[in-house]
Amino acid sequence: MKDINKDNKYLKAKERVEAIKKFYGSIFSSLLVIALVAGVNYYVDEWRNPWFLWVVFGVSIGLIFKALKLFNLNPFMGRDWEERKIKEFMEEDEKQNKWN
């Protein structure tokens, strides 16, 4: 039984490492795209109208949401909100079934 648990933990850890690796790749590719768009913006109008900042804004929003999901950062509900709610509903169901 311990081997199955150990293998399961290893697979979860490996999946997490792969997801983090993919996230870092997204950051790198985003920086390349931003640099390319900024270069085009400079070439076209020498930053008189810095429209490339809209690209920076959009890419940043996407990366923030990816990071929140990947690192389990939920500023609205906390880290273990889901587990607490599940326990709460289970206890509530237990109380209701106790009297039936």
Image (cartoon, rainbow, N blue to C red):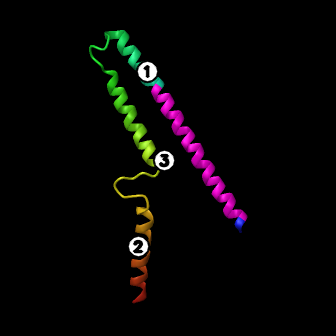
Mark 3 or mark 2: whose residue is earlier in sequence: 3
Asked if 10 appears above or below 99 in the picture, the reply is above
Tag on residue 35?
1
Mark 2 or mark 1: whose residue is earlier in sequence: 1
Where is residue 65 drawn, in percent x and y?
Answer: 41, 43
| Residue behind mark 3 | 70
User: 10 Å neighbourhood of mark 1: few (<14), some, or many (≥20)?
Assistant: some
**Looking at the rendering, which quadrant does residue 66 occupy?**
top left
Q: Residue furthest bottom?
A: 99
Q: Is 7 within the magenta?
A: yes
Q: Is residue 100 visible?
A: no
Nearer to the camera, 100 or 30: 30
Pick the quarter of the image with the C terminus: bottom left
Tell me the CA gap for discs 2 and 1. 49 Å
**Secondary structure type for disc 1:** helix
Label 3 close to label 1 by CB (< 8 Å): no
Principal secondary structure, stretch drawn in magenta: helix
Asked if 22 appears above or below 15 in the picture, the reply is above
Query: Count of labels shown?
Result: 3
- Residue at position x 40%, y 37% in the image: 62
- Magenta part of the protein: which range? 3-31
| Residue behind mark 2 | 89
**Secondary structure type for disc 2:** helix
Which three-letter amino acid code belongs to the residue tagged 1? Ala
Which three-letter amino acid code belongs to the residue tagged 2? Phe
Task: Look at discs 2 and 1 and give the one toward the viewer.
Answer: 1
Where is residue 79 drawn, in percent x and y?
Answer: 43, 58
- Residue at position x 43%, y 81% in the image: 94
**Looking at the rendering, which quadrant does residue 64 occupy?**
top left
**Looking at the rendering, which quadrant does residue 95 occupy?**
bottom left
Where is residue 30 drawn, in percent x and y?
Answer: 46, 29
Which three-letter amino acid code belongs to the residue tagged 3? Leu
